[in-house]
Image (tube, helix red, strand yellow):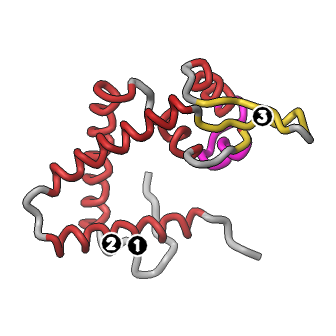
């Protein structure tokens, strides 16, 4: 299967794409190890918990944000509720809409996961020059913003 880049001049940087793919693979490997040692949750479950951090969202909003079918998002949230990590509620003005928010146990788990991830990154960057660390941070955020921008539907 061949995919062409619709933007002229794009596709001329396979080395950058390869490097980013290597970074993503390394991150995914650390997340799999994290699952065994820290959270015991699937990556998709953790992603939903992080999405709920500091807010209450409907199951539909979670499904849309994660490109899931509504039924899949609902099952995952129900499982997280069974584990005591989220609390489900219905909207008072529309009882058909189910919402979810983190429980205290879910918030504590995310704090633990964040600390673990921070330690992993700090160990990986140990010995790096501070300017290189800052450049990595800055360029990573720039790439994330651009990818997020590309993911949004075009405005009319």
Q: Position of residue 27 (x, y in %)?
A: 30, 46
| Cα distance in 3D space between marks 3 and 1 | 35 Å
Location of residue 97 by image quarter: top right
Q: Can you name the residue that lies furthest to the right here? A: 93
Q: How many marks?
A: 3
Q: Can you name the residue that lies furthest to the top here? A: 82
Work out whether mark 3 precedes mark 2 in sequence or the reverse, and give the earlier one.
3
The verdict on residue 61 being magenta is yes
The secondary element bearing badge 1 is classed as helix
Density class for disc 2 (Cα within 10 Å; few <14, some 14-19, many ≥20) is: few
149 above or below 99? below
Q: Which residue is mark 1?
A: 142
| Cα distance in 3D space between marks 3 and 2 | 38 Å
Density class for disc 3 (Cα within 10 Å; few <14, some 14-19, many ≥20) is: some
Q: For the residues labelled 1 and 2, say whether their Cβ atoms are less than 8 Å apart.
A: yes
| Cα distance in 3D space between marks 1 and 2 | 5 Å
Work out whether mark 3 precedes mark 1 in sequence or the reverse, and give the earlier one.
3
Q: Which mark is residue 139?
A: 2
Q: Quadrant of the C terminus?
A: bottom right
148 or 36, which lies in front? 36
Location of residue 71 by image quarter: top right
- Magenta segment, principal secondary structure? helix
Density class for disc 1 (Cα within 10 Å; few <14, some 14-19, many ≥20) is: few
Tell me where the magenta segment starts and ends, as one range: 60-72
**Residue drawn 11% across the image and 56% down it:** 126
Q: Which mark is residue 98?
A: 3
The secondary element bearing badge 2 is classed as helix
Q: Position of residue 124 (x, y in %)?
A: 16, 51
**Viewed as shown, does residue 107 lie left or right of 89?**
left
115 or 39, which lies in front? 115
Q: Position of residue 60 (x, y in %)?
A: 73, 42
């Amino acid at each position: 299967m061949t995919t062409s880049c619709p933007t002229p001049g794009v596709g001329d940087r396979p080395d950058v794409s390869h490097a980013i793919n290597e970074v993503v693979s390394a991150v995914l490997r650390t997340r799999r190890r994290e699952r065994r040692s820290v959270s015991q949750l699937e990556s998709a479950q953790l992603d939903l918990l992080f999405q709920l951090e500091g807010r209450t969202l409907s199951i539909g909003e979670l499904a849309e944000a994660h490109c899931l079918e509504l039924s899949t998002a609902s099952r995952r949230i129900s499982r997280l509720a069974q584990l005591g990590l989220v609390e489900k509620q219905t909207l008072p003005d529309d009882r058909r809409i189910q919402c979810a928010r983190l429980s205290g146990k879910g918030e504590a788990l995310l704090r633990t996961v964040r600390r673990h991830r921070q330690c992993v990154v700090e160990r990986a960057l140990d010995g790096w020059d501070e300017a290189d660390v800052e450049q990595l941070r800055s360029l990573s955020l720039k790439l994330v913003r651009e990818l997020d921008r590309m993911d949004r539907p075009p405005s009319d």
